[in-house]
Amino acid sequence: MKSVLPLLAALLFIASPASRADDAAVPVRLLVLGDSLAAGFGVDPDEAYPARLEQLARAAGLPVTVVNGGVSGDTTAGGLRRLNWLLRQPPDVLLVALGGNDGLRGLPPAATRSNLLAIVDAARARVPGVRVVIAGMQMPPNLGDEYKREFRELFPAVAEAAVAALVPHLLEGVGGRPEMNLPDGIHPTPAGHAVIASN
């Protein structure tokens, strides 16, 4: 598959004066289109990974403003429906971090793939030049090996088809680790959100 830039490297490129026609001091807008993970269910908003991403970017000297478009319970279909509203203030980078709820509901991976591609197409039609990053998700084994495999593979396939950057597994180092999650076993603790941001 085509090599892609990590998120912060992409932000660095966008924020550099050579890549921007406008004032380089104007912050790069990163929109996180996500679900309860992005919304920061069970933690303070400034502990959720979108806020942590902004902190990481600024610590790296990047003028980045992160817009948290996370809604608890959202699916890829829901994200597609509300995308135009979120794009009223055009982002420079769109991080699509949806699909987990699709998987937990056992929705067909083909439908999730179709919705993700439609999100990318709609974003690029509304905001030409927006850079897109797809966040990969994985499912627990209780849904069956075949479903788990199909679900895991759809995100790299979407990134390749859409010529988008890929975060291979958003919950790497967090999913399935009790110490990184709240008692529900699904939503990260503040420490878990810090790991997600580093992913």
Image (spheres, rainbow, N blue to C red):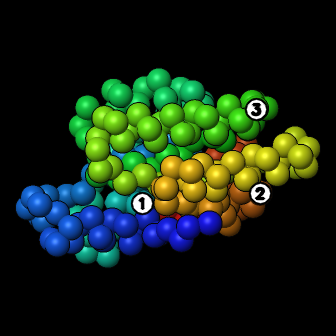
Disc 2 vs disc 3: Cβ atoms closer than 8 Å? no
Residue that label 3 marks: 108
| Residue drawn at the location 51% of the way across and 34% of the way down | 118
Q: Of the residues shown, which amino acid type is indicated by label 1? A: Arg
Q: Eyeballing the image, is 130 above or below 85?
A: below
Q: Position of residue 150 (x, y in %)?
A: 79, 47
- Alpha carbons under labels 1 and 3: distance apart: 32 Å
Q: Position of residue 183 (x, y in %)?
A: 72, 47
> Could you tell which of marks 1 and 3 lies nearer the N-terminus?
1
Which of the two marks, 2 or 3, is nearer to us in this view?
Answer: 3
Which residue does the numbered mark 2 point to in the structure image? 176
Quadrant location of residue 76? top right
> Residue 44: percent from the left, percent from the top?
45, 47
- Decide which of 190, 123 is in the foreground and name it: 123
Q: Are marks 2 and 1 in contact (CB under 8 Å)?
A: no
Q: Element at badge 3?
A: loop
Left or right, 115 with reference to 88 = right
Q: Secondary structure at mark 2?
A: loop
- Give the quarter of the figure containing the C terminus: bottom right
Q: Which-is-in-front pick, marks 1 and 3?
A: 3
Q: Give the image quarter of residue 75.
A: top right
